[in-house]
Structure formats: structure tokens, C-alpha cells
């Protein structure tokens, strides 16, 4: 049985894709449905599915970033991107290294993709140039005209409501429905789930290192790797260290 991970941040679209897959590919075992890139990367690393359906634009890690990281954690996983933007349907897709589905997904297009995935799975034919293809797609997918990243936040610290510049935050940590912002001066509580922050933080400087943690790259002083593939971050102005789960260590390969 072929197993799949499905990642789509919009619940209705995620359910719709699940129904289409059940109709088109009834023997497929969807082992995880994820609403963001971090959850998708962790699921791919854990289950090592034969195929992953990834929305290109998700909070935090994009589908492209998930795919590039998954090359190391699950190199045999075939990638199918879903997108609402036809500019992604470029030569890199058409060469057959990866597949894409344009939203709204047409059943006949999904059927054609399923046949290609099945054929590659039967032959073990994962394209050798998949990493290069994904890099080309990432360059082509650089967003234009996107919203200005968040520069400051208001957060609760005791009875105070503090205004904190985002650059002064070392990392964010999920705390149930809220988020804790950690600075050199201590912690403050944001009445917003960490997933919503991923939409407004600058993706160049803020990276998810775990499903519940976002770190400011400017706050890192060192990356320590262990034999298991996990990593530990030492911070400039905080005494604690942060654990980077193994699937996310690819983000720090060049540090």
C-alpha cells in the first residue's frame, strides 16, 4: 500500500483533496493531514511516505522548503505540489521531476498525476535532479508585492502591556492558544497562536525549528549538532538553549 502525507493550511481545501484522493486512488493510505509546513515536515520524517501532497504557500515553512528538507529525511518520497497560482506551472514541473495540481483541482488532472506517481513508485524512479529542480522552483516562487513583515508587537508582561520590537525577540514559543515571546529582558505573552505569527514574521530572519518554536536567526550565536541528527542552538542574550528537531536541521546546513 502506498502511503501519503497531505499538507494544506485551509481546512476546506484539505478535506476536498482528501475526498478526491479517496475517489481517484482508493487504495492510497493518507497517514497524516497537516495544516502547516512544520507539521508536514515532521510527518514526512516520521513516516517516510511514498508521496507527499504539499501546498506551496503555507504558514512558516512553505511547501518548497518542506520538500527541500525532506530530501534528507525521506529521499524516496515523491512530491506533488498544489497551488492556486499558475505561474508555478513552469518547465521544472513539466520535466517530470515533480508534479503539481492547480487549484481548484480537476479530477482528470489528479488522475493523470496519480498515474505518474504510481509509475515512478513501481520503478523506483525518483529523479536524480530533484534537489536542483526544487532550488529552481524556490527561486521562481520568490513572492512579489507581499505584505510588509511585522516590526513590533504588543504583549502582556504581568499587568503591563509592552511594545516590543520584533528584532529584539530571540524566539517565540507556543503556549496552548497563546505564544510566549522571549527577549533579553524576559518573557511576554502574546494573545495569538504561534501559527498566526508565521504569516506576518519576516521569513528571512525567523525560522521554525520545531512545531512549537520560531527562532530569530539574528539571535543565534552557535549551532551544535549531535550524532542523532538533532541540533542545539545557543543564543546571544538568553542562557537557555533551543533544540532543533532533526527534520529542521537542513535550515542550518550553511551556518
Image (cartoon, rainbow, N blue to C red):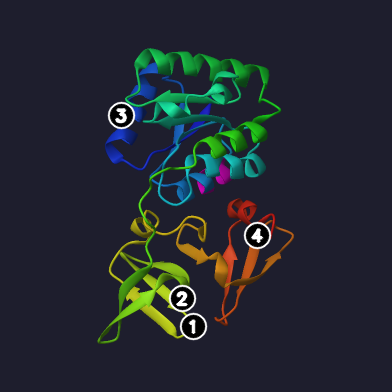
Principal SS element in the magenta part? helix
Badge count: 4
Tell whether 72 sits left or right of 105: right
Q: Is residue 64 depicted above or below 167 in this figure?
A: above
- The residue labelled by disc 2 is 168
Residue at image point 58% right, 45% down: 45
In three-dimensional space, the C-alpha distance between marks 2 and 3, rounded to whole angstroms, equals 41 Å
Q: State if disc 4 and disc 1 touch (CB < 8 Å).
A: no
- The disc, 2 or 1, on the residue closer to the chain's N-terminal end is 2
Q: Residues within 10 Å of mark 2 (few under 14, many from 20)?
A: some
Q: What kind of element bears circle 2?
A: helix
The nearer-to-camera label among 2 and 3 is: 2
Q: Residues within 10 Å of mark 1 (few under 14, many from 20)?
A: some
Give 97 or 204, whichever is nearer the viewer.
Answer: 204
Q: State if disc 1 and disc 3 touch (CB < 8 Å).
A: no
- The residue labelled by disc 3 is 16
- The disc, 2 or 4, on the residue closer to the chain's N-terminal end is 2
Tell whether 27 sits left or right of 239: left
- The residue labelled by disc 1 is 184
In magenta, the rendered stretch is: 42-47
Q: Residues within 10 Å of mark 4 (few under 14, many from 20)?
A: some
In three-dimensional space, the C-alpha distance between marks 2 and 1, rounded to whole angstroms, equals 8 Å
Q: What kind of element bears circle 1?
A: loop
- The disc, 1 or 4, on the residue closer to the chain's N-terminal end is 1
Q: State if disc 1 and disc 2 touch (CB < 8 Å).
A: yes
Residue at image point 45% right, 76% down: 182
Amino acid at each position: 500500500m502506498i502511503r501519503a502525507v497531505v499538507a494544506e493550511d485551509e481546512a476546506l481545501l484539505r478535506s476536498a483533496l482528501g475526498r478526491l484522493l479517496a475517489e481517484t486512488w482508493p487504495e492510497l493510505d493518507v497517514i497524516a493531514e497537516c495544516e502547516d509546513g512544520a507539521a508536514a515536515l515532521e510527518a514526512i520524517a516520521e513516516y517516510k511516505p511514498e508521496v507527499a501532497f504539499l501546498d506551496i504557500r503555507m504558514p512558516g515553512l512553505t511547501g518548497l522548503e518542506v520538500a527541500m528538507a525532506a530530501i534528507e529525511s525521506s529521499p524516496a518520497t515523491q512530491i506533488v505540489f498544489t497551488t492556486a497560482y499558475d505561474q508555478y506551472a513552469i518547465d521544472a514541473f513539466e520535466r517530470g521531476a515533480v508534479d503539481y495540481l492547480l487549484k481548484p483541482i480537476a479530477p482528470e488532472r489528479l488522475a493523470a498525476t496519480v498515474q505518474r506517481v504510481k509509475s515512478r513508485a513501481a520503478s523506483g524512479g525518483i529523479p536524480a535532479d530533484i534537489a536542483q529542480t526544487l532550488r529552481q522552483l524556490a527561486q521562481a516562487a520568490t513572492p512579489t508585492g507581499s505584505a510588509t513583515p511585522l516590526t513590533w508587537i504588543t504583549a502582556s508582561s504581568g499587568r503591563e502591556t509592552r511594545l516590543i520590537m520584533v528584532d529584539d525577540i530571540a524566539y517565540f514559543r507556543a503556549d496552548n492558544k497563546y505564544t510566549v515571546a522571549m527577549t533579553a529582558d524576559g518573557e511576554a505573552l502574546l494573545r495569538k497562536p504561534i501559527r498566526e505569527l508565521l504569516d506576518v514574521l519576516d521569513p528571512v530572519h525567523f525560522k521554525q525549528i520545531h512545531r512549537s518554536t520560531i527562532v530569530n536567526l539574528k539571535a543565534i550565536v552557535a549551532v551544535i549538532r549531535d550524532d542523532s541528527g538533532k541540533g542545539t542552538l545557543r543564543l546571544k542574550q538568553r542562557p537557555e538553549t533551543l533544540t532543533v528537531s532533526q527534520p529542521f536541521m537542513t535550515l542550518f546546513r550553511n551556518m
